[in-house]
Amino acid sequence: MKHRLKKIVVNRLRPPRWLGVCIALVSVVNLARSDAFASAPDFARDVAPIFRKYCLGCHNAQEAQGGLVLESHALVLHGGEHGAILVAGKIDQSRVIRMLEKKAQPVMPPEGNAGPDAAEIAVLKAWIAVGAKNSTTTSNASLAMTVPRIEPKGKPRKPINALAYSPDGRWIAAAGYREVSIHSASKPSPGQTPVQSLNGLSGTVNAVGFSADGSLLYAAAGEPGLFGELILWNTDDWTRRQTVRGHRDALLAAALTRDGKLAATGSYDQSIRLWDTSTGKELRVLNGHNGPVFDLAFDPTGRLLASASGDRTVKLWDIAKGERLDTFSQPLKEQYAVAFLPDGRHVVAGGVDSRIRVWKLSDSAKEGTNELVESLFAHDGPILRLAVSRDGRWIVSSSEDRTIKVWNAAHYEQVARFTQQSDWATALAISPDNSTLAAGRIDGTLSVRSLADLSTGPSRGAAALDYSALPSLDSAAQPLKTIAEKEPNDTPATANRLDVPGTATGHLEGPKGRPDFDYFRFHAKAGEAWIVETEAARKKSPADTRIDVLRADGTPIERCLLRAVRDSEVTFRPINSGQGGVRLENWREMDLNQFLYMSGEVCRLFRAPRGPDSEYDLYTMNGSRRCYFDTSAVDHALNEPVYIVEPYAPGTRLADNGLPVFPLYYSNDDDASRKLGRDSRLTFTAPADGDYLVRVTDTRGYSGPDFKYSLTVRRPQPDFNVSLNPRSFKLPAGGGARVSVALDRVDDFEGEVRVEFSGVPSGYHVTSPLVIEKGLVEARGTINADADAKPASADTWKACRITATAKIGGRQVVKQLPPFEVTLGPPPKLVARLRPESAGDADGAREEIVIEPGQTVTALLQIERHGYTGEMRCEIENLPHGVIVDNIGLNGIMVRAGENERQVFLSAAKWVQPTERLIHAVADREGSQTSRPIALRVTAKSP
């Protein structure tokens, strides 16, 4: 709330809707009783303030309840849906007086709201009695406010709310309170006398800018709760060219098309208005925001307008048609700033949620076609302003954390950080030659910094770690030496020596049941990898071990740094240590394969939610979610903060982004791969030659004579094992059944495994090869029989070969799987078929589905019914990782009773590499019937 209050008090005071909708903090306008008027009441001076104070909350041009608008003399006389509200010269026949005096229904104002007092009603009566005439004086009288005099304490500050360079780089325009100051760009210090001061504006000036040719200067201002004001000056002599008043509240934003012919203004009244700058005529009102419009930006062509609002959205508008093209709803909180990159194809925005988001626009820019390409957590506080260099290299952001940051617009990487700002930097501008940055602050200070020495290339010193890289290997397994624990060994100085590879046996028995810590010392060379594991629970010991690998003096060893790049939280419900999915806040800005940090546990995102009532699936192993970097699974509470993180090597210098960096150490409670139950396991890579310690304890602090364990330190031997499920099939003639291969990964092996089937009898077909992708543990194919297939003998099936192949440490490893058996059964009651939605070539070319990364395509699921008449749900299986069935709704792929066809949407993530895969459909009825496989080909992304 603090950031909003400060911003609003300084620049954007917004009165409440009713009970003085427009002037809640304003004292009552100087009204005299009707019998004391020296002359007839004046509409602008005496009557309009009463309507503003009590009525405009409901009877304004935007809401117009009952069709009644009380914003001008003509509209008051016009009345509403029920006719006129007054009769000139006849008080008793004027409905507005009768409703205010509660003599007619509906009573006004509504119950629970304050209305005019007797003196104010007397003013209205006196005005009606003399003919309800319009003002003879200027309408500005109706816009004056009488406010309490507040004596300043100390020297008042003069905030700078907006800055703009002239196109020739000669001037800097600074927006303040009731004025715009023109400074020499070579000497922009506010301590120096401005070249020109443009005064006489209304209220706070919230936006300022030059036309592209430099002939015009514009400024957006106005009185809160009263009106907005756009002023244009000729820059050759600084004469005022045009003053345009509109809106029902102060202007917060303004923008000019490149040709200078069209201006857009945004206000606290939630509307956007378009103006002809040559005539001052209002051309169009753009309604659609439900909050203040804080910023506006035209694209270089002037065809599109982007708006940032307090309703937590950024909207895109077609100027010619006056239509909303798209609403970017990904932001979590109010959006204060928006800009186009010079290419006109990217929109950049920032606000209270501290993120810089970038959307790439399609050719049509229509809703649903514009892609969010970046969501960058940029500051440790709300973003106040954004500026984009004219050459498209830099995006500059300022924040309530009192920092200014410069970002590479090509890679969205931080290249500079200007800290210790004297106050919030509420104004930013980049010089036309892209060499300098001007910043203005709430305390009135103005400074200029050079951008000339910044690097445009990506950072080379902060490459993320590759988790799948194999540890250093031995060519062959080594025998283990075994020792027995010798007490005392409960300090680093008394640690038992363990020759590695080796095993130590011991038990955790502290004095009087207190926790026991057993230390073992071993020697390792730099870069050597060692697997450290315990065996206790598997031998029925009550010990729940925890292991830590430490330096020789007992201090922890940093394994890696996890840099948070996105914050989130657990929503909907808590999760336990075994669940394979979690609901996350703002999940749409996350991507598959990213690491998720949850209070010390590191998981990985496997599949995004596919419907409104689903969760983010995590990688699993052995029936539970898998942990990474040898962290251990724990329970997580509802609303617990979590983070998307990137891993970096220890000691890496990381540019701050307002989010935490978590150090990970060599420690494990329960085996991260979920194979060893409560026993512990980790992989340690020695950072240097020397001695290291392993500390063994019970994670709960328990101990006793039966808390036995063994500790093994050995070299890793990466390997794999593959199993086929099921081993035998009862296959219907003309039908199909699912074939599943499961992979057991050994000692950190993460690579791809290919399973191939050969020697399959004629009339039968098996998906081959089945590819278990990098990091995954399962692949599903299908075995199908032709309608006229003949039974094959057991010996024929035993002659089939099933071969699993992988590369480990540069060598090819081949393993043979036992054969399977197939029994042919009667035809199924349904047959599924998956095919492209468009027909194949007439020359008989094979059918295939083709998709590009980042694309969505359609296919057809067809059902032949041979006796089964009910509904069914289907899945598409063996899709490459990153390709999903999309738009499935709450019921998945549902084929209702009586239907024989269903359109299926397939979407590929933008990072999916070119590949080809045989995919199939499987129904949940009639023994899980599968379709014949069809090729899915992922091509390279079109340029």
Image: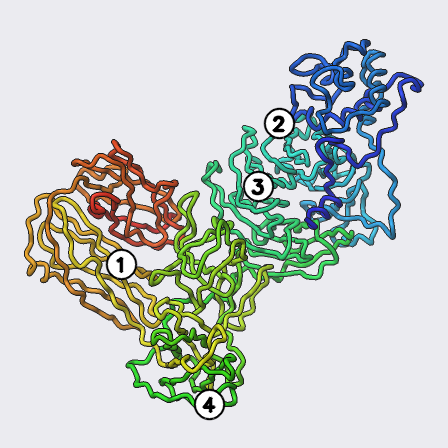
Query: Which mark sits nearer the N-terminus, 3 or 4?
Result: 3
Q: In the image shown, does 248 or 604 lie closer to the viewer?
A: 604
Residue at left offset 51%, top offset 37%: 326
Q: Is residue 635 above or below residue 532?
A: above
Which residue is identified by label 3? 313
Alpha-carbon span between mark 4 and mark 1: 51 Å
Which residue is identified by label 1? 771
Alpha-carbon span between mark 3 and mark 1: 43 Å
Q: Are marks 3 and 1 in contact (CB under 8 Å)?
A: no
Q: Is label 2 or label 1 in front? A: 1
Alpha-carbon span between mark 4 and mark 2: 86 Å
Q: Amino acid at mark 2?
A: Arg
Residue at left offset 38%, top offset 59%: 619
Label 2 element class? strand
Residue at left offset 30%, top offset 54%: 915
Q: In the image shown, does 740 or 754 lie closer to the viewer?
A: 740
Point out residue 367 in the picture as x, y percentages from the top left corner.
48, 37
Point out residue 832 in the picture as x, y percentages from the top left corner.
21, 41
Horizontal side of 328 relative to 271 (left or right) equals left
Q: Is label 4 or label 2 in front? A: 4
Q: In the image shown, does 749 or 170 lie closer to the viewer?
A: 749
